[in-house]
């Protein structure tokens, strides 16, 4: 009898320890208890990605900011890339998240849906009102659209990005082509140019590609493939209604182009080395999915390059390039009001030196006065990027972004593998709609 | 008529089979001394044409925090071995040589955990670690795997073989139960402990799924997860030779251990009652 | 220190002593309660919830299960898993038995060759993935070997939707056949030599002796290997994670249920759905194992 009791007691102790010792998991709505008294000292918890060239610039600004604002203390943490998503989500969910963090637009849909983001406090950031913020940026409406939901702005950009086309000028000249004159304006023309730039060995195997897409991650279906669909007037994902439109003539045309690229014209495909790697190795003549951050890498690899706008379709309805994406400073809606104000002030300070950040860290922040300066105008590549960005829109900002991207990639591979395109697209539309229905804000 | 294959013929067959199975590892070690452009050479280079010495190994130490990964893996494996062996011996002894209320269902419960696929535990364990504050820490990495039901099973089989007279004699001499375990039983289980230690070390050293999930900070990462960076084909610069060097290093401890203690490994399998 | 009185209160003495047994097993039992039973029950609970990292679990009843039935990726993963299990159980079972028979015989350098044969068991599956990625390059070593008999330009071992799953089965077999061989060997050594000799004396050939004498006595071993190789194959994750293009590709031909659980839980952070798939996987494994053990009732591995 006593034995039974002993067993029971030990089990109860165990369960008590397991259950009792844990705090309930909170959502990001919990108030972060950092510095609550008005006008009294306020602490802002700041989380940043680990981008080494940028860190010293940040530190300089942080030091100056705290000197200029003696009542604001900044606790800054740098977090490595691969830990970012889980760490941030975990911290936000348990109520211990940062007050200010710079987050990529890929996940912004999910965060906004959960109510984690605070809309901008324009005055705290040093602007008269929200409209003034948009005006402070070149093509502000287009470029800040990434953090805009229902006409409210939820962030200040730390890095705006788009893809442009880079040509390896040496390889072009070797094929008798002039990148400045002969760069194709249309995808159709690209095919012919790429043929001229493709080199094969005696067995017919490709040793140098003229151009190739980036095949190895689903995200490019939403950054590149979907942008091509948009050129034709379509759009695979409607982020307002959370619906998918995949079984459409526009998508079919782009999918057919991809299929032909790999199977009919045999100019590239997923079985080859990644296009970015081969471009830097001098084995690929043209690459259209590098941002401005690619330029330093090419300098290191000793590639002589020039920049061009993306091709469009001959029958295009829209003149857009590839999708824009960005990193924005965002503020935790769960932080105390004074902390939020301080956070926006800090965010504004951290984005107040676009020249330095572009120059030393390769990060483009599109402030209007910087863009108007000579420094910017004389930049070899940025004007092309800026023009493309102004013409293009952001990728769909949905919760479930990566899952949708993966599903689209699978559909693409099925078509490449020879399955009937109509069937695949119809099934993909159902699949993506299911994903979106599950991910949709309730 | 009794057909018997001659030893020589058997040797030939075994040689071919052994070579086939050993070849990939031989290739790994050989490639760790090759130049990068030799790795995919066609026709293949069986041995390095341009012997690189230890250069790929040196690069390996620069490419990833190899020393840190080694340290973490060693830490985890050592703790796993020590704790598993000790507590399995204790539990095995308890199940084998004692008769208490609930013994049967407790034993079946422990046994049943062997059949539980780890995948059903990863999400709840992950949440549990967050609750304990152990997410992304050594505690979270090591504690959930610190004991092993197979060890209990094995130790119980071995413990059966301990003569009761020995235990009774110690009791008559006035020894308390803990002391009997520590001074009489545990030493008698030493060969079983050695076998279990080898098996647990192998399992712990190569453990992948749990460290992948619970640790994101490089400081606490173990070797297998640290090596996944080499499985991505689309890095900007191919580093296959370095990957081979690092892989060789990662396999070395287990290989050495096994080389010297294989007898215990086999014994462990045999005598844990697998014959039924 | 208890002063044992050997007369009179013997039953009391024995009873008190048995508590020590409980004390000795308690740490282990408690450990499994906290880190196995509790998570398992919680996991089953999560399968009835909608649960992402950003918000706590909210009860949705059978919704996840209903959605899964229509989930294309999930249904594919069942097929992928079954294919992998079929390819990784019976063939492996047979080959490892043959290898055991081989290494049971006496011939020169047997121990050394056995050691070499055993080496695939030692490296971590990540190392296995790295090495085999090189070996299975379209223009790599395995292709060169095939080229000795067939004239082929390139073989897409890992990128072809048809070949890729077969490659996984092949690599997996390479890693575990030697391990199961050891277990077979252990079983073989347990068969008394007299039985074999008696059969020989009676005029049986090698194969007759094997089929009539050894195989039946290997029953428990055979069942054991069948059971654990099946349980292991159903949980396939690491190889597919590390070696298949884009973690489960090409397309989805390598997305096993184990990989899907990780994908749903730790790539998409749909923890509720991950839990649901894991519950289903657990149920499948349980059912299959029970069927296996029931079918071999006569030779059941005894647990006394």
Image (cartoon, coloured by chain):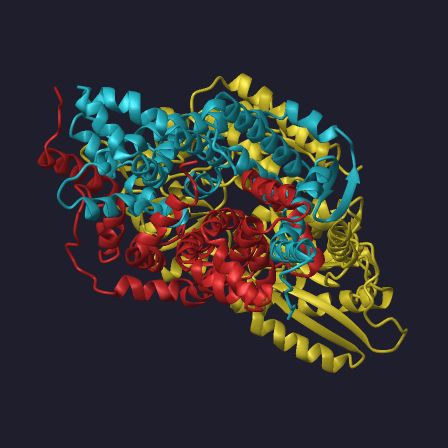
Chain colours: A yellow, B red, C cyan
Picture quadrant where residue A132 is located: bottom right
Residue C29 vs residue C38, the one in the foreground: C29
Left or right: residue A424 compared with residue C209: right
Left/right placement of residue C240 relative to residue A42 reads left
In the image: residue A333, left or right of residue C154: right
Horizontal and vertical percent for residue A349? 71, 70
Q: Which residue is found at the position 53% from the left and 29% from the top?
A: C289
Pick the front one: B191 or A55? B191
Residue at horizontal 75%, vertical 37%? Answer: C49
Residue A180 seen in the current view: no
Q: Residue at x 76, y 50 (%)?
A: A8
Residue A296 image offset from top left, x and y in percent: 44, 61
Quadrant for the C terminus of chain A in the image:
top right
Residue C137 to residue A48: above or below: above
Q: Is residue A216 above or below residue B130?
A: above
- Residue A6: name its quadrant: bottom right
Q: Is residue B189 found left or right of A303 in the rendered image?
A: right
x, y (%) of residue C201?
17, 23
Examine the rendering and report whether any part of residue B193 can be seen. Answer: yes
Q: Residue A200's spot in the image, x, y percent?
A: 24, 36
Q: Is residue A83 above or below residue C302?
A: below
> Could you tell me how many numbered marks the image carries?
0
Residue closest to the far right = A38
């Amino acid at each position: 009898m006593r034995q039974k009791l002993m067993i029971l007691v030990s089990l109860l102790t165990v369960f008590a320890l397991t259950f009792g010792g844990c705090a309930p998991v909170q959502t990001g709505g919990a108030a972060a208890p950092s510095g609550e008294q008005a006008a009294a000292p306020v602490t802002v918890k700041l989380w940043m990605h680990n981008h080494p060239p940028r860190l010293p610039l940040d530190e300089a600004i942080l030091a100056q900011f705290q000197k200029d604002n003696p009542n604001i203390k900044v606790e800054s943490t740098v977090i490595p890339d691969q830990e970012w998503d889980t760490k941030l989500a975990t911290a936000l969910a348990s109520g211990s998240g940062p007050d200010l963090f710079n987050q990529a637009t890929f996940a912004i849909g999910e965060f906004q849906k959960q109510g984690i983001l605070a809309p901008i406090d324009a005055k705290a950031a040093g602007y008269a009102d929200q409209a003034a913020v948009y005006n402070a940026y070149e093509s502000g409406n287009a470029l800040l659209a990434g953090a805009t939901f229902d006409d409210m702005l939820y962030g200040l950009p730390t890095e705006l990005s788009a893809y442009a086309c880079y040509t390896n000028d040496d390889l072009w000249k070797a094929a008798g082509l002039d990148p400045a004159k002969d760069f194709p304006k249309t995808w159709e023309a690209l095919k012919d140019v790429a043929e001229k730039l493709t080199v094969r060995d005696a067995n017919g195997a490709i040793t140098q590609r003229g151009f190739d897409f980036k095949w190895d991650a689903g995200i490019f279906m939403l950054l590149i493939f979907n942008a091509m669909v948009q050129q034709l007037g379509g759009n695979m994902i409607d982020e307002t209604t959370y619906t998918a439109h995949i079984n459409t003539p526009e998508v079919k045309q782009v999918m057919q182009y991809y299929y032909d690229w790999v199977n009919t014209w045999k100019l590239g495909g997923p079985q080859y080395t990644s296009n970015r790697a081969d471009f830097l190795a001098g084995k690929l003549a043209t690459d259209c999915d590098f941002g401005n951050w690619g330029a330093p890498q090419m300098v290191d690899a000793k590639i002589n390059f020039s920049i061009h706008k993306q091709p469009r379709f001959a029958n295009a309805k829209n003149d857009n390039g590839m999708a824009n994406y960005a990193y924005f400073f965002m503020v935790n809606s769960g932080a105390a009001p004074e902390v939020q104000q301080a956070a926006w002030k800090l965010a504004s300070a951290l984005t107040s030196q676009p020249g330095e950040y572009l120059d030393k860290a390769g990060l483009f922040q599109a402030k209007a006065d910087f863009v108007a300066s000579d420094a910017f105008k004389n930049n070899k590549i940025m004007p092309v990027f800026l023009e493309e960005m102004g013409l293009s829109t952001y990728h769909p900002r949905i919760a479930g972004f990566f899952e949708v991207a993966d599903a689209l990639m699978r559909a693409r591979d099925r078509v490449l593998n020879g399955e009937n395109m109509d069937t695949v697209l119809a099934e993909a539309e159902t699949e993506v709609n299911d994903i979106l229905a599950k991910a949709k804000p309730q | 008529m009794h057909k018997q294959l001659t030893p020589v013929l058997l040797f030939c067959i075994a040689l071919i089979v052994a070579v086939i199975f050993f070849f990939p590892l031989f290739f790994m070690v050989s490639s760790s001394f090759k130049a990068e452009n030799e790795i995919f050479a066609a026709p293949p280079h069986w041995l390095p044409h341009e012997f690189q010495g230890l250069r790929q190994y040196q690069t390996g130490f620069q490419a990833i925090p190899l020393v840190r990964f080694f340290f973490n893996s060693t830490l985890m494996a050592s703790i796993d071995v020590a704790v598993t062996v000790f507590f399995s011996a204790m539990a095995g002894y308890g199940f084998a040589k004692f008769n208490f209320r609930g013994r049967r269902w407790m034993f079946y419960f422990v046994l049943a955990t062997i059949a539980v696929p780890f995948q059903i535990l990863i999400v709840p364990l992950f949440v549990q670690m967050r609750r304990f504050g152990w997410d992304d820490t050594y505690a979270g990495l090591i504690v959930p795997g610190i004991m092993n039901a197979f060890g209990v099973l094995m130790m119980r089989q071995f413990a059966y073989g301990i003569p009761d007279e020995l235990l009774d004699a110690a009791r008559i001499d006035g020894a308390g139960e803990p002391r009997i375990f520590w001074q009489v039983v545990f030493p008698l289980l030493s060969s079983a402990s050695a076998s279990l230690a080898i098996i647990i070390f192998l399992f712990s050293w190569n453990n992948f799924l749990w460290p992948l999930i619970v640790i994101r900070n490089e400081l606490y990462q173990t070797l297998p997860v640290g090596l996944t960076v080499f499985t991505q084909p689309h890095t900007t610069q191919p580093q296959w030779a370095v990957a081979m060097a690092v892989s060789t290093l990662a396999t070395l401890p287990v290989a050495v251990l096994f080389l010297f203690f294989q007898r215990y490994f086999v014994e462990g399998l045999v005598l844990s009652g697998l014959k039924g | 220190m208890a002063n044992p009185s050997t007369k009179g209160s013997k039953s009391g003495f024995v009873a008190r002593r048995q508590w020590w047994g409980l004390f000795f097993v308690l740490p282990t039992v408690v450990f499994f309660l906290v880190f196995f039973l509790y998570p398992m029950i919680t996991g089953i609970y999560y399968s009835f919830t909608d649960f992402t990292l950003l918000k706590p679990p909210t009860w949705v009843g059978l919704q996840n299960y209903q959605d899964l039935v229509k989930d294309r990726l999930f249904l594919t993963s069942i097929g992928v898993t079954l294919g992998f299990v079929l390819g990784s159980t019976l063939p492996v079972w047979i080959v490892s038995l043959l290898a055991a028979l081989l290494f049971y015989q006496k011939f020169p350098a047997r121990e050394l060759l056995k050691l070499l044969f055993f080496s695939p068991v030692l490296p971590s599956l990540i190392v296995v993935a790295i090495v085999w990625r090189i070996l299975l390059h379209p223009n790599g070593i395995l292709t060169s070997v095939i080229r000795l008999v067939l004239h082929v330009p390139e073989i897409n071992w890992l990128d072809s939707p048809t070949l890729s799953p077969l490659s996984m089965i092949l690599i997996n077999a390479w890693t575990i056949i030697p391990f199961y061989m050891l277990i077979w060997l252990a079983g073989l050594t347990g068969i008394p030599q007299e039985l074999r000799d008696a059969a020989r004396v009676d005029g049986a050939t090698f194969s007759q002796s094997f089929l009539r004498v050894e195989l039946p006595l290997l029953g428990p071993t055979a069942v054991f290997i069948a059971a654990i190789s099946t349980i292991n194959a159903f949980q396939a994750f690491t190889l597919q994670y590390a070696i298949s293009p884009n973690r489960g590709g090409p397309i989805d031909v390598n997305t096993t249920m184990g990989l899907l659980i990780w994908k749903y839980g730790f790539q998409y952070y749909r923890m509720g759905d991950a839990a649901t798939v894991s519950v289903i996987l657990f149920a499948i494994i349980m059912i299959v194992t029970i069927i296996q053990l029931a079918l071999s009732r006569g030779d059941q591995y005894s647990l006394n």
